[in-house]
Image (cartoon, rainbow, N blue to C red):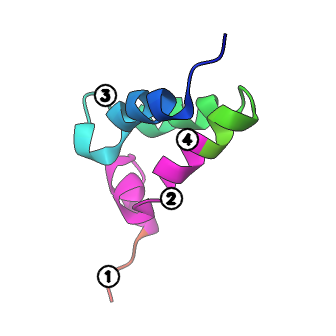
């Protein structure tokens, strides 16, 4: 039996920048990309929603230069 994509999306959304319970949420989503094609598509859709937020919440804030 396969978990519906909508359920995966709801689970993965708990690892989005809005729900920053852990500092390594984005790393968990990157690991989900490697599971299978369905998980990859679902996780990437979350990672690309607001890519600037992921950079902000990652510990690499020096990637963004103020204009």
What segment is highlighted magenta in the picture? Answer: 42-63
Where residue 49 appears, as percent x and y from the top left, is 43, 59
Return the disc, 1 or 4, that comes first in the chain's sequence: 4
Return the disc, 2 or 1, that comes first in the chain's sequence: 2
Q: What residue is disc 2 on?
A: 48
Labels 3 & 1 near each other (Cβ < 8 A): no
Q: Where is 56 relative to 44, above or below?
A: below
SS at mark 4? helix
Where residue 34 appears, as percent x and y from the top left, is 72, 31
Q: What residue is disc 3 on?
A: 22
Where residue 10 appears, as percent x and y from the top left, is 39, 32
Given residues 10 and 32, the one toward you in this image is 10
Where residue 1 appears, as percent x and y from the top left, is 67, 10
Q: Residue at x 31, y 28 (%)?
A: 22
Return the disc, 4 or 3, that comes first in the chain's sequence: 3
Q: What residue is disc 4 on?
A: 43
Q: What residue is disc 1 on?
A: 66
- The quadrant in which residue 23 appears is top left
Labels 4 & 3 near each other (Cβ < 8 A): no
Labels 2 & 4 near each other (Cβ < 8 A): no
């Amino acid at each position: 039996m396969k978990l519906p994509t909508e359920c995966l999306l709801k689970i993965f959304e708990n690892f989005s920048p809005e729900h920053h319970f852990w500092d390594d949420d984005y790393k968990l989503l990157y690991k989900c990309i490697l599971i299978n094609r369905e998980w990859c598509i679902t996780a990437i859709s979350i990672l690309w929603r607001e890519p600037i937020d992921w950079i902000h919440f990652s510990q690499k804030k020096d990637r963004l230069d103020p204009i």
